[in-house]
Image (tube, rainbow, N blue to C red):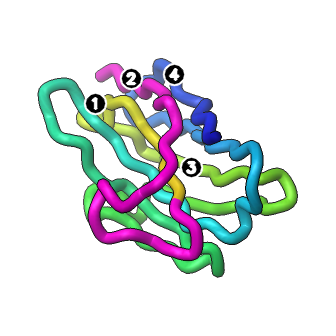
């Protein structure tokens, strides 16, 4: 199971650190992705981190965010800086064992989402 947390209300330009905590299994063997879904829009990929620590970022957050993992705590973090109103969305984490899937349907496990609201 995955539990996303850390969302909240922040002013434009502010920062948040989202966390995705896993229970059960060996989290260190999982690729993890952060996704977001804004009202009226499709869910989109924000960032990924492989079980080996390789990272990827969507262009809209590149240079403003950092994804990292602490396997001892079974947790993956997404640091978001320089937040903009258009970053307002529900952020979800997802995991897949020994993979970083290309398509969303290939991610096996999903967290419940955490709401990020950025005011202008």
Write the start and end of the magenta stretch as one range.
96-120
Which residue is rendered at x = 36% and y = 61% of the image?
106
Q: Secondary structure at mark 3?
A: strand
In whole angstroms, how far apart are the C-alphas of marks 1 and 3?
A: 16 Å
Find residue 22 and report its horizontal and vertical position in percent: 70, 46
Residue that badge 3 annotates? 79
In the rendered image, which quarter is residue 63 located in? bottom left
Q: Nearer the viewer, residue 53 or 59?
A: 53
Residue that badge 4 annotates? 8
Q: Which mark is residue 117?
A: 2
Q: Secondary structure at mark 1?
A: helix
80 lies above or below 66? above
Find residue 49 and report its horizontal and vertical position in percent: 54, 68
Q: Nearer the viewer, residue 16 or 14?
A: 16
The N terminus: image quadrant: top right
The mark that comes first in sequence, 1 or 4, is 4
Find residue 11 and report its horizontal and vertical position in percent: 42, 24
Are the residues tagged 1 and 4 within 8 Å (C-beta)?
no
Residue that badge 1 annotates? 85
The mark that comes first in sequence, 2 or 3, is 3
The mark that comes first in sequence, 1 or 3, is 3
Is 67 left, or right, of 27 in this rendering?
Answer: left
The mark that comes first in sequence, 1 or 2, is 1
Q: Few, some or many C-alpha atoms within 10 Å of disc 2 (few <14, some 14-19, many ≥20)?
A: many
Is 51 left, or right, of 25 in this rendering?
Answer: left
Q: Few, some or many C-alpha atoms within 10 Å of disc 4 (few <14, some 14-19, many ≥20)?
A: some
């Amino acid at each position: 199971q995955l539990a996303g947390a850390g969302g909240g209300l922040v002013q434009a330009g502010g920062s948040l650190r989202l966390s995705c905590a896993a229970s059960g299994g060996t989290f260190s063997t999982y690729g993890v992705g952060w996704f977001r879904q804004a009202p009226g829009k499709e869910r989109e990929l924000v960032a990924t981190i492989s079980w080996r620590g390789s990272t990827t970022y969507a262009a809209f957050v590149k240079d403003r965010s950092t994804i990292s993992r602490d396997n001892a705590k079974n947790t993956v973090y997404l640091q978001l800086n320089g937040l903009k109103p258009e970053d307002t969305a529900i952020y979800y984490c997802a995991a897949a064992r020994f993979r970083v899937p290309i398509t969303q349907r290939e991610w096996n496990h999903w967290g419940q989402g955490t709401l990020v609201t950025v005011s202008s």
